[in-house]
C-alpha cells in the first residue's frame, strides 16, 4: 500500500508552529540547566513540567513503551537514550536532547546536541558540522525538489568534513501523528523519492558519527550507540514546505550552541 503524505492547511501549520515553539522553548530552558553533576532524569522532569505548564503533553512518554519525556543520549549514544538518575553529566560530555510534544492535536519535534562544560576542538567540530548539515538540508526544502535533495545535502556536507551519517535511523513526516510518511534519510538512497509539495511538514534530523556509520541497540531495547564507540551528534528541526521556501517551525532551539 502506498504511503500517503498528508498536506497541512495554513491554520494547521499555525498550530504546528505553536507546538514546535513549546519544544524550542523547552530545549532553550534545558540548555540553562546543563552542567556537570546534573542527572538526565532531572532534565527529563524539567522538560515534562515545562510542557504541561504550556498546555501540551510530552510526545515520547509512553510512545511504544518509551519511559521518558526526553530522549537524552550522551557521547557515543546516537539517539533514544533513556533518562536516568544514575546518568550524571560530566565536564567534557556531549548530550543530545530530543523532545516532542502534542498540542491541540498536532505534534512538534526537535533536537540539539550540546557540550557539557569544555569540549575539545574535534568534538566541537562534530557538533558544528552536524548542525550545519541540518541547515544545508533545510535549504533544499523547496516546492518541486525531492526528498533525495534533502538527504544528499546532509550526506555531502557531513562526508566532506570527514564524518559519517547514520543510515539505520531517519527523519520523518510529522503532523497529527508523531511519525508520518515520508521517511527523510540522511543519505542518498537509490530510486525516485517523493516530491516536496506545499503543506508538507518534515522532521529533518541528521545523526552524525565521528567514526563509522554503523550503530547497535543496547539491551534496554532503546538506546542506540555507535558500533565503534565513536562520538555522535544529533540535530533536528520540524520544517514546513511552503511556496515561499522552508519554514522552520521549531526555530530558536539551537542558537549559540557553542
Image: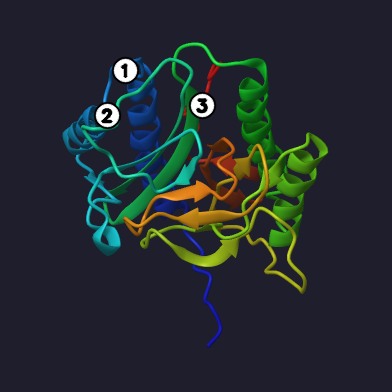
Can residue 244 be spotted in the picture? no
N-term-proximal mark, 3 vs 2:
2
Helix, strand or loop status at disc 3: loop
Vertical position of residue 2 compared to residue 51: above or below: below
The label shown at residue 85 is none
Q: Dividing the picture into quarters, in which one does residue 248 lie?
A: top right
Earlier in the chain: of badge 1 and badge 3, it is 1
Residue matched to label 2: 43
Is 157 on the left or on the right of 86, as rendered? right
Q: Residues within 10 Å of mark 3 (few under 14, many from 20)?
A: many
Question: What count of labels does the image hold?
Answer: 3
SS type, badge 2 = helix
Q: Are marks 2 and 1 in contact (CB under 8 Å)?
A: yes
Q: Secondary structure at mark 1?
A: loop
Nearer the camera: disc 3 or disc 2: 2
Residue 203 image point, x, y percent: 52, 51
Numbered tag placed on residue 254 in the rendering:
3
User: Could you tell whether 227 is left or right of 105 in the image?
Assistant: right
Q: Residues within 10 Å of mark 1 (few under 14, many from 20)?
A: few
Of circles 1 and 3, which is in front? 1
Give the residue displayed 67% in from the left and 24% down from the top.
125
Is residue 254 found left or right of 154 in the rendered image?
Answer: left
Q: How is the image coloured?
A: rainbow
Between the C-alphas of marks 2 and 1, the distance is 7 Å
Residue 11 x/y as whole percent: 41, 52
From the image, tell me which residue sits under label 1. Answer: 33
Instruction: From the viewer's perspective, tell me whether residue 141 is left or right of residue 159.
Output: left
Marks 3/2: CA–CA distance: 17 Å
| Residue 79: x %, y % from top left | 45, 46
Residue 222 visible: yes
What residue lies at 69% left-to-right and 60% top-to-bottom?
A: 147
Amino acid at each position: 500500500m502506498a504511503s500517503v503524505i498528508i498536506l497541512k492547511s495554513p491554520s494547521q501549520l499555525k498550530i504546528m508552529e505553536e507546538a514546535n515553539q513549546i519544544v524550542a522553548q523547552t530545549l532553550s530552558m534545558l540548555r540553562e540547566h546543563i552542567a556537570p553533576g546534573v542527572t538526565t532524569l532531572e532534565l527529563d522532569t524539567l522538560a515534562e513540567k515545562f510542557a504541561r505548564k504550556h498546555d501540551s503533553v510530552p510526545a515520547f512518554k509512553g510512545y511504544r513503551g518509551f519511559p521518558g519525556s526526553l530522549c537524552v543520549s550522551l557521547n557515543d549514544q546516537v539517539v533514544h537514550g533513556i533518562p536516568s538518575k544514575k546518568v550524571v553529566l560530566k565536564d567534557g560530555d556531549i548530550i543530545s536532547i530530543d523532545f516532542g510534544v502534542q498540542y491541540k492535536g498536532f505534534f512538534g519535534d526537535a533536537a540539539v546536541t550540546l557540550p557539557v562544560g569544555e569540549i575539545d576542538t574535534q568534538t566541537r567540530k562534530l557538533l558544528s558540522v552536524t548542525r550545519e548539515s541540518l541547515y544545508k538540508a533545510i535549504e533544499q526544502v523547496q516546492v518541486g525538489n525531492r526528498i533525495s535533495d534533502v538527504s544528499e545535502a546532509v550526506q555531502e556536507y557531513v562526508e566532506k568534513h570527514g564524518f559519517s551519517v547514520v543510515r539505520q535511523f531517519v527523519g520523518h513526516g510529522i503532523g497529527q501523528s508523531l511519525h508520518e510518511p515520508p521517511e527523510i534519510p540522511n543519505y542518498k538512497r537509490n530510486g525516485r523519492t517523493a516530491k516536496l509539495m506545499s503543506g508538507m511538514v518534515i522532521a529533518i534530523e541528521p545523526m552524525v558519527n565521528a567514526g563509522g556509520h554503523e550503530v547497535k541497540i543496547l539491551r534496554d531495547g532503546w538506546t542506540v550507540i555507535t558500533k565503534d564507540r565513536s562520538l555522535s551528534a544529533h540535530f533536528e528541526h520540524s520544517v514546513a514546505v511552503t511556496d515561499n521556501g522552508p519554514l522552520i517551525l521549531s526555530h530558536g532551539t539551537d542558537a549559540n550552541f557553542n
